[in-house]
Amino acid sequence: MHIKLKLGVLAMTIASPLVFAQDILWEKSYGGKHAEYLYDAIATPDYGFILAGSSISGKNGNKEDKNKGDLDYWLWKMDEHGNLDWQKSFGGNKVDLLQSIAITHDGGFILGGTSASDKGLDKKEVCKGQEDFWVIKLNAKGQEMWQKTIGGNGMERLLSIAPTKDGGYILGGTSSSDKSGKDEKGVDDVYGKSEDSRGNLDYWVVKLDKDGKVLWQKTLGGKYVDELKSISQTTDGGYILGGYSNSPISGDKTESNFGLGDYWIVKLDEEGTIEWQRTLGGDQDDHLFALSQTTDGGYIVGGNSNSGATNSKSKTNKEGTDFWVLKLDKTGNIDWQETYNYGKIDILTSIVENPDGSYLIGGYAQSEAQVKSQKSKVKSLQSDKEGINDYIALKINAKGEEIWTQTVGSKGEEVMKKLLETRDGGYLLAGTSKGSVSRDKNSVKGGYDFWVVKLRDKEREEKARITVEAMPNPAIHFTNVIVNFEYKKGTATLYDLNGRSLQSMEITGDKTIPMELSTLPQGIYLIEIRTNTQHGSVKVIKK
């Protein structure tokens, strides 16, 4: 494979050394003959990955399920080499957009997105308005456990979902609905809206328990447009929300907007009450796409900006729209901020903190990219028609200084949605590609495909793998045994500490093996894996 590195120009005043340490291990395209759009991706404990998005293709290409209606939820679970473990499709008769996925406390998956479908096919509840939140809980094998449709009489769009410490889930999205009326039984609809709209669009937060029951919900907004893009639980049990707002002081918004639109960050306590909020922006338009708490108790915030150095923005944009990243303290005050420029329009879609305190930033460039030659190290603006609309992977240190940048793409259009560090020390770039076979891309399935690229960091040594692991551990109802070696057949056996065999099953190459523990008393148990290639065991604590 021909590998082309393009190293980004530093968009900061103090330059840091660049490291040329990334090789493409493999790249894969997934999809049918029509279109697939990837919106999220996560690493799984078995060193594999799961891709989440929507598909309009039929049973063709490497898609195994027929299309249900318009766009359907589509999941692709792959091993560490990009090969298929399993895939699942869920849909109704209209548009279903899967936006977010997370691993749950029991080792399964929670899916969050938006549905306009009526009851029928895979959709078990009626549509409440134009579009609703649609949440599906899966076990570790991708089998459905339950689903919920949540919404009002207008439009709801779920953008972010995350598990919470109590075993439940927090949902974050946008709503235009007013308070719902009675359900079909004549009682208040607990899965509807409990508050009227503040303006045009509002933040809408819904807390679910482990079985999908609504515990509480909050509507937050000003008089105009407020779009929530990210939500997660914080270490104090509360929640951090981030999105876009062009509302002035009104409704729940206590700070006026600076430009056309700004970052709007809201901190809630564990019951959904506002603790503090921050409006961040310059004189033009600023869109937040990623926000999470950092290990020091502060927050990392990322998005796009075309503002100059005005108001709360101290770093001007270089050309058009640039990445704008801020590090905030525990109460939302700015520690540092930087802009990163690659072309006329740079769209940041993902930012995550690594265990060493560095950050991975993912996005894409929609025009010519500024590059620095490895040989001459002279800045230049290259049209590089083959490089337009490429994935951008950026790694920065804890102070915002660039460590390395790499772009990957084809002659077509690439939109990267997620960049993450993998368990083996590499990096996964995941998004949607309309590109033809060229440069870094070796296969095409349809018009738009899921496209995933695995990078290897040559500077890092891979840690030795544990032969057999169990997650979660301690466990309550069941655990997933992770087998970190290749095999064709074998057995998985659960023993108590007296050596008595309590349950046993045959296994045929699976890397993730669910084990039922709900009927066992509290204590310590041993799970042994014996196969045709090797064997191993792991102790599991039953709570």
Image: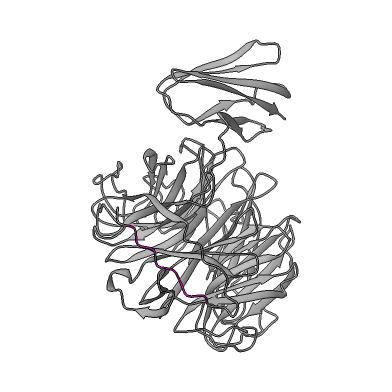
Q: Position of residue 166 (x, y in %)?
A: 70, 46
Compare residues 155 and 389 and report the one nearer the observer.
Answer: 389
Q: Position of residue 228 (x, y in %)?
A: 56, 68
Residue drawn 37% across and 80% down?
381
Position of 200 with respect to 250 (left or right) is left
Q: In which quarter of the image is residue 383?
A: bottom left
Residue drawn 49% across and 20% down?
534
Q: How is the image coloured?
A: one colour
Instruction: Please provide the residue range marked out in magenta.
Output: 3-10
Q: In which quarter of the image is residue 280?
A: bottom right
Compare residues 426 and 85 and report the one nearer the observer.
Answer: 426
Compare residues 242 and 197 and report the one nearer the observer.
Answer: 242
Position of 527 with respect to 118 (left or right) is right
Q: Does the magenta stretch include residue 7?
A: yes
**Count of labels shown?**
0
Q: Is residue 17 magenta?
A: no
Q: Is residue 160 above or below residue 262?
A: above
Q: Is residue 507 above or below residue 21?
A: above
Q: In this view, does 463 lie above or below 251?
A: above
Q: Looking at the magenta stretch, what is its main secondary structure?
A: loop
Q: Quadrant of residue 281?
A: bottom right
Image quarter (top left, top right, bottom left or bottom right) of the C terminus: top right
Whether residue 179 is visible = no
Position of 249 with respect to 339 (left or right) is right
Whether residue 219 is visible = yes
Q: Where is residue 265 in the image (x, y as percent from the top left)?
A: 65, 71
